[in-house]
């Protein structure tokens, strides 16, 4: 005779929204606990480290402003990635697409000779197009030849990194920079306004918020969004319904790459005011945005929240570096752990434990 | 007892099987036959209850334990390694070789003994992929006998066989039983129960309804036990009102996914108001035919005319717009998007036409109204039109697909295995729907492996074998035996029209 079991693990047919939120929060919490072990291994109290991060990123006006300015590129890249991920295109290349946007913006700012009023709009347009083009290459390779999108988008990042390196060491090196590997400073008409004493380039922020709403409308309310979802959820059904996977793939990568390109424009026109080393332009925004989009469960509106969360982690990373003497890369540890626990929690979300006291 | 999330799949079933009998387990899809057998074979553990073998309680915790208790199982979809030879498949996992070496010599002798004793002729050196489906099944049986099974569980063993192969299988089963083996034979076909079994157990919704000696029952009473109500065996079908020629297929050729010829020189016509069935053992080009006709596969040569208009190699979308509906074989994998709502699934093809779209936007109000209408008309049982399609049962998914495909009053309907895996009620309804479309004057191409269905519904029957048309018969004059011969490759002359 079998003993009556106290509880049983069952698969949920549908995962309700509150469970998704709860499980996501638990995953972040688990990642914080796991990262805490590393702090302790460094001989630093984990609790103190988190206090410092919270205080640094949220406790002062300056910290809050840094959090927001870090969130801007994450927001733009993250929204784009939700669209790509909806169509099951694994765009790991937002980093490179962002850099191409930065390159295009710098090119327009320094060499176009456009009248001042047109300069910033032209930079954003060029940045979008450059990012989109960089995203289109892997899109065509996948849709026409079936070449793995993860590998191509990732590799395109390295090409973008070395393209930037080459430009700032070679043809675009600024004559006024005394041999340093930067371009010249942008003319003042090519520099984005910021909120008084902060580094928040508000036009890009505004753009990001508008884009998040538009992306949501696109996915939820339009024909193109319907097609994107069908292709992503069931490519066979898309083929059956006569929806072109080719066109849909190109569309999502134009959007995804283009938005990452816009993020690049914001960084060089709003923060650096010149083109400089690729790791200084981006600090891994394109990679972090993958986690941002995933934590948002591919919902563009939710990216507004998750990009802020990772803004906190990134500006907290600055604090850790300064106050505790740890390398900035510690935030990569955070990011990695959060992604790890998030993906792990995907599986958990689909199950529930039910307690039963039935006998036989 | 076995529970799955939300459903009790097998509920307080007391099944007793005697040594040396063929015991049929009869029930509709979802009645719990396969669950019960998977418990016996150690795939699932019962939540309560026990299994007795020769009076002794046993705990079957895995298939290997089942094997140790001499229980063998032959799955509906064979578990063979197709690139290996027959003998290699037979010893897979039970080889008594020396270290890393196989001991094929001894194996061969035993296989030869088994094949000879039971008339299971098959070349032990042949690779499995070279064998016909019937021969592959024999390999599965040899495998079980090689493992010295005393009890053989067979899950819907006839679903992939021609009528002749079925007869051969039944002969083999008789010899096995005479030799003392016990066979549990899972099926939902009444004819087979009457033909082969000694006793029969009927399951309905996970519960055991009755166990009877086959000699003391008949088809209608078994059907009543299985479904729980009276079943109509013949559909009301009016004489054909043959209309104009709607589909003309002329010397069509195409390739399979593996690049091999899948259709060879296929020519036929379908008229408005008639049902032309395509009969054949699965994998003889039927799927490819449906795909070429609906624009999902390219023809390598030949022509397809729809109402006189050439639609060869046009896109799926153009062909849909020309009035061709497709009820796909893979109704879940291809016909629906499981994670999207019923409402959205119902506009999967029409979303880009008014009223469901306005410019670049979708009109969800209209989609909702459409869903309400379709759910009422086709009796689609769903929690609501916004619930995900994956929550629907197989029958309701098929009703949803039909509602969508037939909404535009199509001229041609290509229906592939439209009732496969559905319960009796849903099957009846799907067939009624097809007959209503026929009355309306649509041309219907019905691709089915269910001969009973083919005989019942069609006006004419086209038999395919190895990508060729073996002949087209008038349904009134056709006989199962003759169709069976053609399904196995015997060509019939002079019946084309």
Image (tube, grey):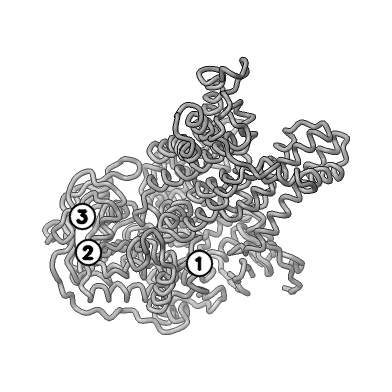
- Which quarter of the figure has residue B415? bottom left
Could you tell whether B196 is left or right of A61 in the image? left
Point out the frontmost of discs 1 and 2.
2
Label 3 sits on a secondary structure element that is strand
In this view, which residue lies farthest toward the top?
A179
- Which quarter of the figure has residue A282? top right
Could you tell whether A327 is left or right of A129 in the image? right
Residue A244 lies, in percent from the top left, at 36, 49
On whether disc 1 and disc 2 are found on a single subunit, the reply is yes
Residue matched to label 1: B21
Above or below B220: residue B354: above
Q: Mark 3 and mark 1: span between their CA atoms?
A: 39 Å
Residue B181 lies, in percent from the top left, at 52, 60
Instruction: Say few, some or many: other residues with alpha carbon within 10 Å of mark 3 (under 14 / 14 to 19 / 20 or more).
Output: many
The residue that appears at 74% across and 71% down in the rendered structure is A356
Residue matched to label 3: B470
Q: Nearer the viewer, residue B486 or B47?
A: B47
Above or below B337: residue B216: below
């Amino acid at each position: 005779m079998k003993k009556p079991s106290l509880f049983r693990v069952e698969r949920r047919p549908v995962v309700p929204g509150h469970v998704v939120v709860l499980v996501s929060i638990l995953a972040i919490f688990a990642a914080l606990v796991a990262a805490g072990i590393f702090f302790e291994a460094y001989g630093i109290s984990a609790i103190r480290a988190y206090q410092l991060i919270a205080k640094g990123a949220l406790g002062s006006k300056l910290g809050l402003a840094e959090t927001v300015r870090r969130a801007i590129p994450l927001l733009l890249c993250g929204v784009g990635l939700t669209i790509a991920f909806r169509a099951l295109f694994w765009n790991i290349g937002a980093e490179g697409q962002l850099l191409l946007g930065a390159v295009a913006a710098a090119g327009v700012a320094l060499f176009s000779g456009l009248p001042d009023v047109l300069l910033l709009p032209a930079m954003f347009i060029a940045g979008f197009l450059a990012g989109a083009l960089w995203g289109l290459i892997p899109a065509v390779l996948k849709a026409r030849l079936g070449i793995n999108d993860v590998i191509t988008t990732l590799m395109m990042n390295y090409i973008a990194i070395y393209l930037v390196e080459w430009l700032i060491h070679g043809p675009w090196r600024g004559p006024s920079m005394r041999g340093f590997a930067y371009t010249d400073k942008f003319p003042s008409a090519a520099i984005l306004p910021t909120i008084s004493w902060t580094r928040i380039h508000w036009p890009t922020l505004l753009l990001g918020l508008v884009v998040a709403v538009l992306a949501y409308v696109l996915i939820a309310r339009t024909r193109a969004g319907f097609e994107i979802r069908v292709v992503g959820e069931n490519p066979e059904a898309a083929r059956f319904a006569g929806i072109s996977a080719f066109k849909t793939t190109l569309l999502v990568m134009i959007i995804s790459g283009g938005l990452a390109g816009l993020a690049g424009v914001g960084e060089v026109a709003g923060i650096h005011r010149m083109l400089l080393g690729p790791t200084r332009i981006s600090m891994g925004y394109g990679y972090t945005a993958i986690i941002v989009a995933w934590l948002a469960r591919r919902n563009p509106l939710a990216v507004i929240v998750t990009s802020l969360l990772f803004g906190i982690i990134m500006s907290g990373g600055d604090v850790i570096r300064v106050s505790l003497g740890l390398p900035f890369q510690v935030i990569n540890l955070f990011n990695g752990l959060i992604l790890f626990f998030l993906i792990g929690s995907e599986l958990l979300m689909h199950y529930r434990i039910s307690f039963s006291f039935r006998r036989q | 007892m076995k529970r799955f999330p939300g459903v009790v799949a097998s509920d307080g079933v007391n099944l007793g099987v005697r040594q040396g009998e063929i015991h049929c387990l009869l029930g509709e899809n979802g009645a719990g036959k396969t669950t019960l057998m998977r418990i016996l074979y150690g795939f699932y553990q019962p939540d309560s209850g026990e299994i007795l073998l020769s009076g002794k309680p046993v705990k079957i915790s895995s298939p290997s334990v089942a094997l140790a208790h001499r229980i063998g199982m032959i799955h509906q979809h064979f578990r063979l390694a197709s690139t290996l030879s027959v003998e290699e498949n037979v010893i897979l996992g039970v080889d008594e070789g020396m270290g890393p070496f196989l001991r094929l010599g001894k194996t061969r002798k035993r296989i030869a003994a088994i094949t000879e004793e039971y008339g299971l002729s098959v070349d032990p050196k042949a690779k499995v992929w070279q064998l016909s489906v019937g021969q592959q099944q024999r390999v599965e049986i040899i495998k079980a006998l090689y493992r010295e099974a005393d009890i053989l569980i067979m899950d819907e063993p006839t679903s992939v066989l021609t009528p002749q192969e079925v007869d051969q299988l039944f002969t083999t089963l008789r010899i096995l039983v005479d030799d003392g083996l016990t066979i549990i034979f899972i099926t939902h076909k009444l004819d087979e129960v009457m033909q082969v079994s000694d006793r029969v157990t009927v399951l309905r919704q996970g519960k055991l309804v009755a166990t009877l000696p086959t000699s003391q029952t008949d088809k209608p009473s078994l059907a009543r036990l299985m479904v729980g109500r009276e079943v109509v065996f013949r559909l009301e079908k009016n004489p054909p009102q043959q209309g104009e020629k709607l589909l003309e297929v002329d010397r069509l050729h195409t390739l399979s996914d593996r690049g091999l010829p899948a259709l060879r020189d296929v020519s036929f016509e379908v008229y408005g108001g008639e049902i032309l069935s395509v009969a054949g053992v699965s994998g003889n080009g039927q799927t490819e035919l449906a795909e070429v006709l609906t624009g999902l596969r390219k023809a390598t040569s030949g022509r397809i005319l729809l109402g006189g208009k050439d639609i060869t190699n046009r896109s799926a979308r153009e062909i849909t717009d020309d009035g061709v509906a497709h009820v796909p074989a893979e109704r879940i994998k291809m016909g629906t998007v499981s994670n999207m709502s019923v409402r959205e699934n119902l506009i999967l093809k029409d979303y880009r036409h008014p009223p469901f779209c306005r410019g670049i936007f979708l009109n969800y109000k209209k989609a909702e109204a459409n869903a309400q209408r379709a759910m009422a008309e086709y009796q689609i049982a769903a929690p609501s039109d916004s619930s995900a399609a994956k929550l629907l049962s197989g029958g309701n998914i098929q009703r949803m697909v039909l509602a969508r495909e037939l909404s535009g009053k199509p001229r041609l309907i290509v229906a592939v295995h439209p009732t496969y895996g559905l319960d009796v009620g849903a099957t009846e309804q799907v067939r009624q729907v097809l007959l209503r479309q026929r009355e309306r004057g649509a041309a219907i191409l019905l691709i089915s492996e269910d001969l009973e269905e083919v005989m019942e519904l069609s006006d004419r029957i086209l038999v395919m074998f190895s990508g060729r048309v073996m002949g087209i018969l008038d349904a009134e004059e056709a006989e199962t035996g003759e169709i069976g011969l053609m399904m196995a490759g015997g060509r019939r002359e002079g019946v084309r029209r």
